[in-house]
């Protein structure tokens, strides 16, 4: 028996934009990187909305504290994307996959110092040196931190 479809097939994007796309959490997830920036995007992720409170998982305790202190600024940005959110709550969620706004390319690095520096290390160094205005001093401090990280890693591998 040959049955004909009464309606044409619908593209999945129209279903997502029409149904799920109207959901507040979907809009926040879709715009998360633009809302929080590249650095926070790597360490925090929106999990759910409960009673108009956005629950955000954060990978480490220092980042949890940092985001708690800047929650009002982040909440203002979120309210521009989604008017239904009244507050934001951060929870430690270490099993969140670390994401990269621009994934690091595979490197065949000849400099052993750079080869042993991981993206999380670079993130830490950037965080630690963010308030140093003098570029020469900042470069020196970054080199010292990189050297310390690689030396510590070498000692641990012995």
Image: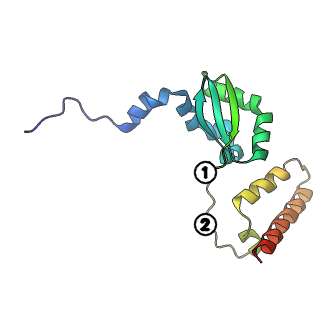
Q: Quadrant of residue 56?
A: top right
**Quick one: SS at disc 1?**
loop
Residue drawn at point x = 55 percent, y = 27 percent: 24
Q: Nearer the viewer, residue 95 or 37?
A: 95
Q: Position of residue 65 (x, y in %)?
A: 79, 40
Kindly identify which residue carries mark 1. 97
Q: Please state if 113 lies on the left or on the right of 37 as rendered.
A: right
Q: Please state if 148 lies on the left or on the right of 110 as rendered.
A: right
Q: CA distance from mark 2 to mark 1?
A: 19 Å
Q: Quadrant of the C terminus?
A: bottom right
Residue 41 higher or lower than 140, as above or below: above
Kindly identify which residue carries mark 2. 106
Q: Position of residue 64 (x, y in %)?
A: 75, 41
Q: Position of residue 101 (x, y in %)?
A: 63, 49
Q: Quadrant of residue 152?
A: bottom right
**Local crowd size for mark 2, using a 10 Å CA cut-off: few (<14), some (14–19), many (≥20):** few
Residue 120 higher or lower than 148, as above or below: above
């Amino acid at each position: 028996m040959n049955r004909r479809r009464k309606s044409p097939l619908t593209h999945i994007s129209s279903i997502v934009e029409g149904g799920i796309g109207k959901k507040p959490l979907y809009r926040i997830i879709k715009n998360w990187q633009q809302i929080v920036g590249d650095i926070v995007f790597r360490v925090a992720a929106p999990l759910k909305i409960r009673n108009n409170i956005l629950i955000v998982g954060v990978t480490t305790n220092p980042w949890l504290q940092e985001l708690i202190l800047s929650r009002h600024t982040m909440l203002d940005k979120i309210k521009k994307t989604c008017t239904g959110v009244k507050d934001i709550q951060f929870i430690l969620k270490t099993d969140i996959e670390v994401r990269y706004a621009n994934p690091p390319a595979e490197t065949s690095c000849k400099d052993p110092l750079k080869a042993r520096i991981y993206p999380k290390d670079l993130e830490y160094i950037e965080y630690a040196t963010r308030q140093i205005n003098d570029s020469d001093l900042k470069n020196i401090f970054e080199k010292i931190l990189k050297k310390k990280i690689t030396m510590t890693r070498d000692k641990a591998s012995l």
